[in-house]
Image: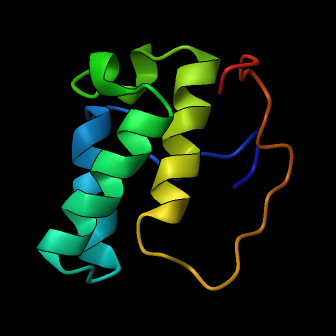
Amino acid sequence: VFGQRSQLWWDLPLAESFALHGAIHRVPAARHRERLDECVELLDMAAFLSTPVRQLSVGQRMRGEVTAALLHSPELLVLDEPTIGLDLAS
């Protein structure tokens, strides 16, 4: 996760970017849904899942970036300034 580089699709709603990440990493549908639900609840993202990434605030986009990085349960997660734009609660 890089603070200044996005892995999300700019014109797609956040939820669709997550679906694409699940497909790219071949995450089983049930596991993808479980992991996504966990991240959405933990990072309070339900209100903006249908919003195109280009319309998200920096903090909302960074929550999406962290979620996209975690969806496939990586063994190693590299974080480079992932807290840019995040509020204290996030």
Name the residue: 63% across, 21% down. 59
> Residue extending furthest right?
81
> Residue extending furthest left?
29
Q: How is the image coloured?
A: rainbow
Quadrant including the C terminus: top right
27 in relation to 12, above or below = below
7 in relation to 10, above or below = below
Is 4 displayed left or right of 64 in the figure? right
Is 29 displayed left or right of 73 in the figure? left
Name the residue: 25% across, 66% down. 32
- The quadrant in which residue 84 appears is top right
Count of numbered badges drawn on the protein:
0
Where residue 5 sits in the image (x, y, percent)? 68, 46
- Which residue is at the front of the view, 19 or 4? 19
Quadrant including the N terminus: bottom right
Name the residue: 54% across, 61% down. 69
Name the residue: 61% across, 34% down. 62
Does residue 23 appear anywhere in the picture? Answer: yes
Where residue 30 sits in the image (x, y, percent)? 14, 71
Where residue 37 sits in the image (x, y, percent)? 28, 47
